[in-house]
Image (cartoon, coloured by chain):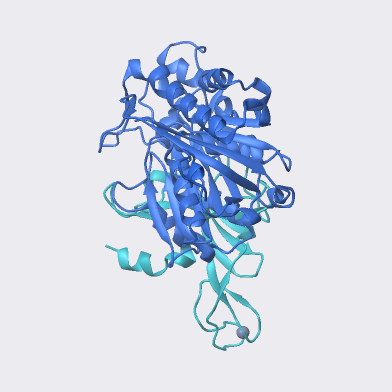
């Protein structure tokens, strides 16, 4: 059972909550309390806008255990507009083909269930093509 | 307060309240009615709607509520930590035991000083949460409360409901009337014990008590709620620019409207069932969000929900100047409806978990 681990990282995973360095202003995700740029202590919470662009991507037709329900899917490295790069699934692609540089926005979705249909549901960030309007 | 005011049947809090923000959500997939008819009638015709919205594989009432609520917060211009309640009305909470509200509150950043809870009253669970939010804000217990009506509606394969049972809904932030984009001038709830539609614990699909579905349920409760609200507020149909009714299909709300003296022009903008289906607890509330997207300051709106079991909540709203600068801060209902990917019946069966894998 991985319940404690899921519980500990839930706020960063539900809503892209990271940190901002008080010394050099750099935005940090995932949060690590130490600035990767200047090495200073960085514990101030920062909520990312959720906007970014596709940096690279790959489609998985034979996903790992626990992801059978949503296979096939596309995983991408997303460069957030504040700088950090995160790995996440893309969703709501419809008929759109994924391209490097494609603008995307964060949505909170069901990632998988922990085990079978009796297990807890795990939610987290994914990204979809930008285009619905302001947010 | 005078004694005559106290004896009123209307629900009016001591402190005036209204909606300070709202947000819609509709998933992107659409199942045409003709696709259902092809499987169950071996023909293309017979669907009461053009198509219905279907949630994707990674969507449920929790994820859809999060997005609608983010839109509502963007319009309200408040921090999630200012919410004192996060209440979600639905017939399709992902868990039987474990609140949807806690996940939604956490994802919004509304935890930890917040009341959360999941509401159920069939298709009026969302408006029930709004009535409660009016009480919380109107009594001064909290300044802002979030109430959501959202569903991934269930219909048994081959049942008439399969044409219409859709996914979507809307979120509303109730706050002080002087900050509102639409003031809630009064509400009224009408309830009886009526066996028109139910789903027992652990059953996947609902049952309907055939002879109870039309006149004794939908029409009686909608009519009584709206008629009493009009009478007690001293208003008539012609005072309202818009009216929104619960919409299980296109015909019911049209007939309910005309019996109350409303014309097609007043209901057309809030009548979304032909293009997204019946979103159960979301239906009246997303109809209202489509109306708020286009309403002008001073416009009056009548909203009446219906939930099987059975009851209706009716609201008299008056739109304020604040609508003009706030509605552009989140995607419109029409933008969600226009975002559309058509699916076939097989894809629908997979998306909605109707395939037995073991
Ligand atoms: Zn730094």
Residue B51 vs residue A115: left or right? right
Q: In this view of the protein, which residue sits in the foreground, B266 or A42?
A: B266
Chain A on-screen colour: cyan
Q: Position of residue A5 (x, y in %)?
A: 35, 68
* Chain that the image shows in blue: B
Residue at 64% over, 46% down: B182
Viewer-side residue, B133 vs B308: B133
Which percent across, then down, holds residue B170? 54, 43
Please tell me whether residue A39 is drawn above or below residue A90 in the rendered image: below
Q: Decide if residue B265 is on the left or right side of residue A74.
A: right
Could you tell me which residue is drawn at 65 percent across and 69 percent down?
A82
**What residue appears at the point 54 percent right and 21 percent down from the top-left corner?**
B250
Q: Position of residue B157 (x, y in %)?
A: 36, 24
Q: Is residue A45 visible?
A: yes
Report the number of numbered marks.
Answer: 0
Residue B230 vs residue A1, the one in the foreground: B230
The answer to whether residue B178 is above or below residue B262 is below
Residue B10 placement (x, y as % from top left): 49, 40
Q: Is residue B292 above or below residue B311?
A: below
Rendering quadrant holding ligand 1: bottom right
Outermost residue to the front: B3
Q: Classify B63 as above or below B77.
A: above
Quadrant position of residue B105: bottom left
Nearer the observer, A41 or A57: A41
- The residue lying at 52 percent from left, 84 percent from top is A34
Q: Quadrant of the C terminus of chain B?
A: top left
Q: Does residue B246 appear in this view?
A: no
């Amino acid at each position: 059972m991985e319940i404690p681990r899921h519980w500990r990282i839930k706020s960063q995973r539900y809503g892209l909550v990271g940190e901002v360095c008080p010394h050099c202003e750099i935005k940090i995700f995932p949060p690590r309390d130490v600035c990767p740029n200047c090495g200073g202590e960085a514990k101030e919470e920062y909520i990312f806008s959720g906007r970014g662009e596709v940096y690279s991507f790959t489609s998985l037709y034979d996903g790992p255990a626990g992801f059978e329900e949503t296979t096939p899917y596309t995983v991408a490295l997303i460069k957030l507009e504040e700088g950090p790069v995160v790995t996440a699934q893309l969703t709501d692609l419809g008929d759109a083909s994924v391209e490097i540089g494609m603008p995307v926005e964060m949505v909170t979705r069901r990632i998988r269930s922990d085990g079978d249909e009796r297990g807890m549901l795990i939610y987290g960030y994914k990204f979809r093509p930008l285009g619905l309007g302001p947010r | 307060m005078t004694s005559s005011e106290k004896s009123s049947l209307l629900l009016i809090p001591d402190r005036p309240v209204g909606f300070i923000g709202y947000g819609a959500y509709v998933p992107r997939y659409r199942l045409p009615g003709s696709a259902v008819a092809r499987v169950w009638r071996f023909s293309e015709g017979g669907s009461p709607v053009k198509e219905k919205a279907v949630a994707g594989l990674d969507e449920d009432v929790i994820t859809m509520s999060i997005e609608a609520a983010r839109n509502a917060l963007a319009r309200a211009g408040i921090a999630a930590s200012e919410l004192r309640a996060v209440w979600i009305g639905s017939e399709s909470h992902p868990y039987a035991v474990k609140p949807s509200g806690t996940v939604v509150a956490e994802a919004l950043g509304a935890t930890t000083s917040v009341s959360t809870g999941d509401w159920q009253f069939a298709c009026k669970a969302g408006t029930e949460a709004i009535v409660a939010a009016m009480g919380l804000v109107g009594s001064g217990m909290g300044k802002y409360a979030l109430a959501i009506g959202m569903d991934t509606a269930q219909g048994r394969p081959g049942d008439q409901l399969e044409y219409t049972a859709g996914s979507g809904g809307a979120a509303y932030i109730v706050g002080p009337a002087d900050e509102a984009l639409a003031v809630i001038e009064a509400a009224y709830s009408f309830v009886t014990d009526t066996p028109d539609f139910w789903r027992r614990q652990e059953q996947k699909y609902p049952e309907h008590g055939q002879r109870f579905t039309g006149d004794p349920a939908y029409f009686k409760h909608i009519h009584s709620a709206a008629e009493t609200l009009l009478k007690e507020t001293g208003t008539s149909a012609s005072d309202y620019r818009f009216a929104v009714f619960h919409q299980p299909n296109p015909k019911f709300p049209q007939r309910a409207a005309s019996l109350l003296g409303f014309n097609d022009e007043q209901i057309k903008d809030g009548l979304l069932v032909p293009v997204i289906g019946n979103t159960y607890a979301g239906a009246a509330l997303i109809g209202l969000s489509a109306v708020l997207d286009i309403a002008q300051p001073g416009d009056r709106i009548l909203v009446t929900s219906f939930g099987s079991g059975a009851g209706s909540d009716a609201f008299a709203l008056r739109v304020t100047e604040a609508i003009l600068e706030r509605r552009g801060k989140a995607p419109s209902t029409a933008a969600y409806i226009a975002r559309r990917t058509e699916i076939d019946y097989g894809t629908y069966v997979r998306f909605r978990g109707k395939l037995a894998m073991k």
